[in-house]
Image (cartoon, grey):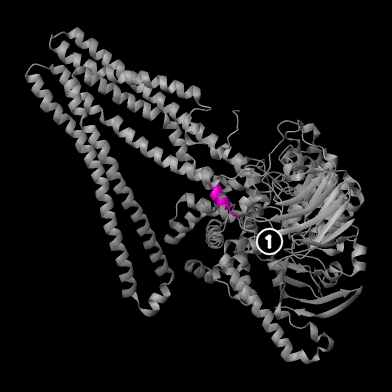
Amino acid sequence: MSSSERNDANANPSSELEENLEILRQTYFFSGLPLETLKIFAYLCTREKFKKNEYIFKQHEDDGRAFYLISGKASLERKDNGNAREIRDCKSGEFIGGLTLMGEIRRLFSLKATEDTICLVLEREKFSKTLQQFPDIMPRIFKAVAKHIDSWEERFLAGRGDMCGECMVNLGVSLI
Amino acid sequence: MKKADIPVVKRSLFSWVFPGNVKLQITLLFIIVVMVFARVVPLEMQKRVVNEAINLRDIDLLFLYCGIYLVAVIFFSGLKYLTNVLQTLITQRATANMRKELYHHILTLPLGFFRNTQPGSVVNSLVTELAMPGNFVGMAIAAPVTNLLTLLAFAGYLFWLNPLLAAVSFSIYPIVVFLVPVLQRGVNRANKRRVDAARTLSSRIAESISGIHEVHGNGAYGIENKKYDRLVDRLLKIRIVWSLYRFAVKTSNGFFISLGPFIVFMLGGYLTIKGQLELGALVAFLSAQERLYDPWKELIEFYQVYQDGHVTYQRTMEFFDVMPEHAIAPADRKPFDLEPNIDVKDLSFVTDSGIRLLDGINLSLNPGEHLALVGFSGSGKSTLALCIGQLYKYTGGHVLIGDKEVSDLTKKDMVNNMGFVAQSPVIFEGTIEDNLLYACKARADGNGQSEADLPSLDDVISVLQQTGIFVDVLRFGMNTILAHDENQELVEVIVRVRENFQRDFGKELADYVEFFDEDKYLYYSSVAENLIFGTPRKSAFEYSRLCNNPYFLKFMKQADLTRPLLSLGADLARQTVDILGNLPPDAVFFEQSPIEPDELDQLKLLVEKLKRRKLHELSAEHHQQLLDLALRFIPGVHKMVALPAFLENLILEGRALFREKISEDEPEAITSYQVSEYIYSQTILNNIFFGKTKTANPQAQEKINQSIIQLLIEEDLLETIIEIGMLYQVGAKGDKLSGGQQQKLAIARVFLKHPKILIMDEATSALDNKSQARIQNLLETRWKEKNTVISVVHRLDTIKNYDHVAVMKAGKILEIGTYDELMARKGMLYELVGKK
C-alpha cells in the first residue's frame, strides 16, 4: 500500500480516482471507512454530465444511484396531485441519496439540473457487491447514517422546531 | 441405470465396490490370482538354480531356470501395471458416480435444508471429500486380495519347504498384530491433543497480532511472550510424545519383521548344517520371508485408507441424509393436467423450530382469477405463495389445485401447470436465449417433447417486448463485434446508412458519442486503437498481439513511445492490483479496469517484481506484459490512472507516423477507419455511429436507443439484431446483467412458458415504473380469465384490478375481497394505502 501511495503522489496529473477519493473522504456516508474500501468505492464511481433542465432522478422512480454534485446546480422538486413545487436548490458539494444505496427506495422528489451539472455517481449494485466483500464496514455505515439522521433532526428542532405548526405531530424521523 | 431404490445417502461405502464395476472387478480378481502365482515362481526358480543348476554344474538348467525367472518377473510387472490401471479406473468411476448421485440427491432437497447449509460446504463435499472414499473403492478388492493371497502363497510355499521353520518364523506375526494397534491408539490420542494444542496456539497468535497496537502501546512484550511461550512448551511436549509413539509403531513393526531372518538363520542354519534342509531351500526361504514385508505393509496401509475413507464417507452422507419432500415425477401415470382452480383450507405452516408462519388460511380462486397478497413484510404473504406453489411443504390444512392435494403431487405435476418468479430470481451462466428457454426446456424435459415444441422466435420476441427487456437485448446485439464474413447483409446496410445516420442524428448524439476523427485523441478508445486507427487485417496486428509484434515494437521505439508506455503500464498494473487485489472475479468490479478477472493473479506477480526492480531491469517478457496493459488503456473508462498530456500528443504523432510507415511497408495489414468500410474490430453500434459511446447514463442510453430503433425498423434489421443479442453471454449468476435486467429476464422466462397458474413473489420490485405498469397491464388484459395468478405485491398502486385482494398480518388473512370492497370497509387495506 505504501508503494501505491508514493506513486499517487508522484503521478502527474492526478487521476480521476484520486479526485473521487478526496470527495468520498469528505462525505459523511463514506468518511468513516478504511482507505482500502474507500479506494474501491472511488474506483467504482463514475462521472455523469447532465445538461440544463435534464432530470438527474425523477419522483417515484427507483434509480438506485447516489449522487455527489461536483459542479453545477440542481433543483429539488416534488409533485403532488399534479402541482410541482420547488423544494430547494442543491449546490455543488452536496451528497444526495445515501439511503438509496442501502435499499430499494422510490424517490419522493425529483432532482433537475438547473445548470450544466457534473455528478459523481455510485450505483446500488456496485455498492452492495462491495459490501458483501467487506461486511465489517457495514456497522460503520449504519452508524454514520444513524448519526446523520439524528443530527439532522436535532438541528431542525433547534433551528425551526417551533415554526412547524400543524406538522409538529409528524416530527421524529430520528425515532424510526 | 440400476435401481435407485435406496437413496444415495443410505448406501454403504461397500455398495459402490461392485455395482457398475462388476466386469472390471472380476477381471481384476483374475489378474491378481495370476499375478500372485507369477510372484511365487521366481522363488522356486531361485531354489532350483542353487540346488539343481549350480549343484549339478548344469549350464542348460541354469539358463532354463533363469529364463523362467526373467519371464515371470516381466509378466508380473506387466500384470502389476494392468492392475494399477484397472484400480484407477474403478476409483475414478466410483468417485464420479458418487459425485453425480449425491449431486442429483442434493438438488432435490427441500429449500429449508439450504437455509442452514453454506454453498461452500456442498462444494467441498462434492469436490474434495468424496475423493478419499473413491480411493477406498478402487482398492477395496484389489488391495486385500492381492496382499492376502500373496501372504498366503508365500506362507504356503514356506510351509511346503519346511513346516517347522515356517511355523516358527510365522509365530512373530501374532505379536505384531497385537502390538501395533495398541501403539497406534497411542498415536491417535497424542495426535488429537496435538491438533487441539495447535489450535489454541493459533488463536493466541491471531489475538496478539490483531491487538498489536495494544501490545506496543503498553509495552507488554513480556506478558505476551510468556503467554505464548507457555503454549509452545505444551505443544513441544505433546509433539514429542506423539513422535515417540509414531516411531514406536514403526520400530516395533520393523523389529519384529527383521527378527524373522534371525530365526530362519538360527534354526534354518542349524537344520542345513545337520543336513535336514537343502541350501537352495534355505535361500528360497530367506528370500520369501523378506518378501512377506511388502504385502504386510500394504495391508496395514489399506487398513488406514479404509478407516479414513469410511469416516469421510459416513460424515458426508450423514450431512445430506435428508429426504426430498416430494417425488420428482410420477412413477405409474402421466403428469396431471390440472384445472387452475385453487382452494386453500385451514392452511398452517410451522417451522422446525416451532414458529407459526401461517395460521388458518382459507381462500378459493376460480380458474383465471387473480389474487394479490399484501401486508407488511413478515406477514406471511411470500410463505403462503410458496406453500401454494409446493416450494414449502405446509404442515397443516389443505391446498388443492384442480381438486388435487398439493402435498401429494409430484414436482413434475406442479412444473407442468405452474410458473414461478422468485423475489430475487437467479439467472444462470449461458446466453440470454438459454435463460429465456430455461423454464420451457425444463417442462419439456420428461414430457417427451422435442426442441420443435419450444417457442418460436416470434413468440420470444413478443415476450421480450412484453417484459421490456427487448431494448436491453437489442443493446447487447448492438454491442456485438461481428466476425469477418458474418452477417454480410447487415454489414452492407450499416455502411450504407452510416452517412444518413450521421446527418440525421449526429448533432443530437454528439454529447454521447465520440466520433472517429483522425486528428483527435479518442478518449473512449484504447491506446492501441488510437495508434492504429484502423482494423487489423493480419492476425499479427490484432490489438492483443501488438505487444508481441516485432514490427510494432520497433515502431514504438521510433515514435519514442516505449518508455512512456512502459511507465503507464506500470502505473496501471500497480493501481489495478491495489484496488482489485482482494476482490472476487465479478464482472461489476472489472468493467472499469483494463484486465479480465482471470488475469489478476499474473498481474499480482508482475507488481511484486515491480516493487523489487526498476523498470529497465525487468525482463523482455515483463516489458511485453506492461506494454500490453498500456495499449489497452482507455482514459475515459479506466480512471485509476490519468493520461499525461505529453503522452497524448506523442500518441497522436505516433498515429500519423504509423499510418505513413504501414502504408509503405505492409499496406494490407491495416484498413484505416473510413466511412466507406465496415470496422470489424468494433461493435455494430460503434459502426453505425462511426464512433464510440461515451456514457452509460440511462437517459443518454434511451436517446441512443430511440434513434437506433428507428433506424433498424426502417432498414428491417430489428429481428437480426435481436437474434444476435440473444446470444449474449450473461456471465456467472448473470453478473453481467443489472438487477432490473435479471428480473425482467426471469419474468420473460415464465411468460414464455405461459403456465396455467402463475405465482409472482414481488416479481417486479427492481423494475422502473414503466416496465412495472406494462407488465401489470399485460396480466390484466391477456392473462385474466385464462390463467390463475397469485401475486405477492409490495406496491399497492398496482392492485386495483385484481379479482381478490388478501391483506395479511402475522400469518393470518385479516380481510379478503375486491379492492373497492376493502377500501369501502375502511379496514387494514384502507390503513395500508393511507400510510403509503
| Location of the C terminus of chain B (image quadrant) | bottom right
Instruction: Characterize the magenta stretch by its predominant secondary structure.
Output: helix
> Quarter-wise, where is residue B612 in the image?
bottom left
Tell me the crowding category of disc 1: few under 14, some 14 to 19, or many 20 or more residues within 10 angstroms, Cα based.
some
How far from the left and from the top, in percent, is residue B19?
52, 28
Q: Position of residue B391 (x, y in %)?
A: 71, 49
Q: Nearer the viewer, residue B607 or B765?
A: B765
Say what amino acid the circle numbered 1 marks: Glu
Q: Is residue B812 above or below residue B717?
A: below
Residue that sits furthest to the left in the current view = B274
Q: Along the horizontal axis of the image, is A81 left or right of B630?
A: right
Find out whether residue B364 is within the magenta segment: no
Residue at x 67%, y 84% (from the top left corner): A151
The answer to whether A11 is drawn above or below residue B558 in the figure is below
Q: Which residue is mark 1?
A: A125
* Number of numbered callouts drawn: 1
Quadrant holding the N terminus of chain B: top right
- Magenta segment: B116-123
- Percent coordinates x, y for residue B48 in the rendering: 19, 13
Please indicate, yes or no, whether residue A27 appears anywhere in the rendered image. Answer: no
Q: Could you tell whether B142 is left or right of B507 in the image?
A: left
Q: Is residue B781 visible?
A: yes
Q: Secondary structure at mark 1?
A: helix
Q: Position of residue B646 (x, y in %)?
A: 60, 65
Q: Between residues B533 and A133, which one lies in front from this camera angle? A: A133
Quarter residue A96 falls in: bottom right
Chain under callout 1: A
Nearer the observer, B587 or B401: B401
Q: Nearer the viewer, residue A127 or B123?
A: B123
